[in-house]
Amino acid sequence: MATQLQQHKQAMLERLHNSAAVLRGRKMLVLVLMDIMMPEMDGYETMREIRTDPKFRTLPSTLPILALTARAMRGDREVCLDVGASDDIAKPVNTAQLLSLMRVWLLR
């Protein structure tokens, strides 16, 4: 049984690291790639609004919001998660890291 579990974990890791296989033929709504530092309404307020707006209840409850942060202040990540972000990524955006986050959220 340990061998089966190990093979299962290996297959999962291989899928996560093979972006072509995971993303091929899939559609992902990049509805929310939220920049925290926006004019007028900041990203924190925007994420709160998105998570509470009834018209977005027709979307999957697992709609991922990836927050773009400068991580300039201690606790930025925690604040993002508290207001509704699924995950965060630091600016400037590393494309490989962004694709990795997208793969993770697609497999949930």
Image (cartoon, rainbow, N blue to C red):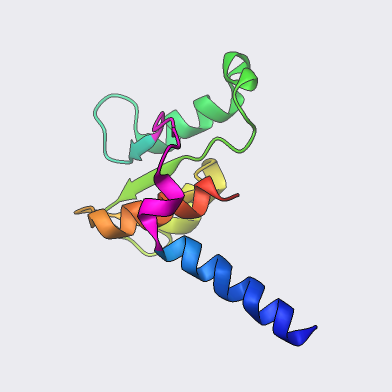
- Point out the residue furthest to the left here: 92
Image point (47%, 33%), residue name: 47
x and y percentages locating residue 27 in the rendered image: 44, 32
Magenta stretch?
A: 18-32
Above or below for 31 versus 81: above
Counting the numbered discs, the total is 0
Name the residue nearer the viewer: 43 or 107.
107
Is 83 or 6 nearer to us in this picture?
6
Q: Quick check: 18 above or below 32?
A: below
Location of residue 39 with respect to 86 vertically, above or below? above
Q: Main secondary structure of the magenta part?
A: loop
82 sits left or right of 32 in the view: right
Residue under the image location 57 percent in, 66 percent down: 12
* Residue 85 belongs to magenta span: no
The spot of residue 93 in percent (x, y) is: 23, 53
Q: Residue furthest bottom?
A: 2
- Looking at the picture, does residue 89 appear above or below residue 9? above
Q: Residue 28 falls in which quadrant of the image?
A: top left
Q: Residue at x 61, y 38 (%)?
A: 62
The residue nearer to you, when weighing 90 against 37, is 90
Is 29 magenta? The answer is yes
Query: Percent position (x, y) of residue 81?
Result: 52, 50
Residue 72 visible? The answer is no
Q: Position of residue 48 (x, y in %)?
A: 52, 32
Quarter of the image for the N terminus: give it: bottom right
Q: Is residue 6 visible?
A: yes
On screen, residue 105 versus residue 101, left or right, reads right
Residue 32, picture quadrant: top left
107 displayed left or right of 24:
right
Q: Nearer the viewer, residue 20 or 67?
A: 20
Q: Residue at x 27, y 59 (%)?
A: 96
Residue 93 relative to residue 29: left or right: left
